[in-house]
Amino acid sequence: MNQKSGKPTRSANEIGKWILILILLTAGLAANYHYYDVAWGIRAAIGIVYIIILLGLALITQKGKLALEFFQGARFELRKVTWPTRAETIQSTFAVMVMIVFTAIVLWGLDSILMWAMRWLTGVRG
């Protein structure tokens, strides 16, 4: 971190890593386009391996380490969640469905009243 501004400084090594990742990504896309006549299964398998390699390279950067730390923290917090039981889920789903039907009926009724009022005001009888 820079002492005066409080912003993290970017080292040449870090910038070089991101340039390498972008070059490899561009080369991979170009190769996929160039070898379009190769079976899609083979290209997909190579693409998956290539993406894993690029993600591995991205994880050794400062931003990659921060992202990994974030996902580890999110996973830790997710373990603290108290999930509803099956019965609670069914009851909540039923309550939502009842409210949707109720809201639909109210909106249908309001629409019918407004349509009747517009026909009465304009004198159009359809």
Image (tube, rainbow, N blue to C red):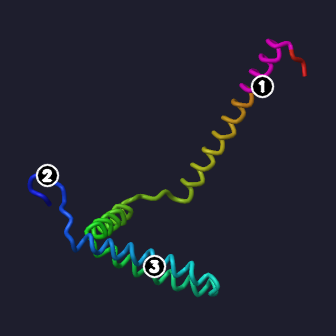
Q: Residue at x 45, y 79 (%)?
A: 27
Query: Magenta part of the protein: which range?
Result: 110-123
Q: Secondary structure at mark 3?
A: helix
> Residue 37's x, y, as percent?
64, 85
Label 3: how many Cα within 10 Å (few below 14, some 14–19, many 20+): few
Q: Look at label 3 and name its amino acid.
A: Ala
Q: CA distance from mark 2 to mark 1?
A: 63 Å
Q: Look at label 2 and name its amino acid.
A: Ser
State which mark lies toward you, 3 or 2: 3
**Which one is nearer the viewer's eye here, 40 or 69?**
40
Question: 102 above or below 124?
Answer: below
**What residue sits right under mark 3 in the picture?**
27
Q: Secondary structure at mark 2?
A: loop
> Residue 77's x, y, as percent?
34, 61
The mark tally for this picture is: 3
**Quadrant placement of the C terminus:** top right
Q: Earlier in the sequence, mark 2 or mark 1?
A: 2
Dominant secondary structure of the residues highlighted in magenta in the image:
helix
Question: Magenta stretch: residue 115 in it?
Answer: yes
- Say if mark 3 contacts mark 2, CB within 8 Å: no
Q: Earlier in the sequence, mark 3 or mark 2?
A: 2
Q: Which mark is residue 112?
A: 1
Q: CA distance from mark 3 to mark 2?
A: 37 Å
**What residue sits right under mark 2 in the picture?**
5
**Which one is nearer the viewer's eye here, 94 or 105?**
105
> Residue 121's x, y, as percent?
79, 12
Question: Magenta stretch: residue 35 in it?
Answer: no
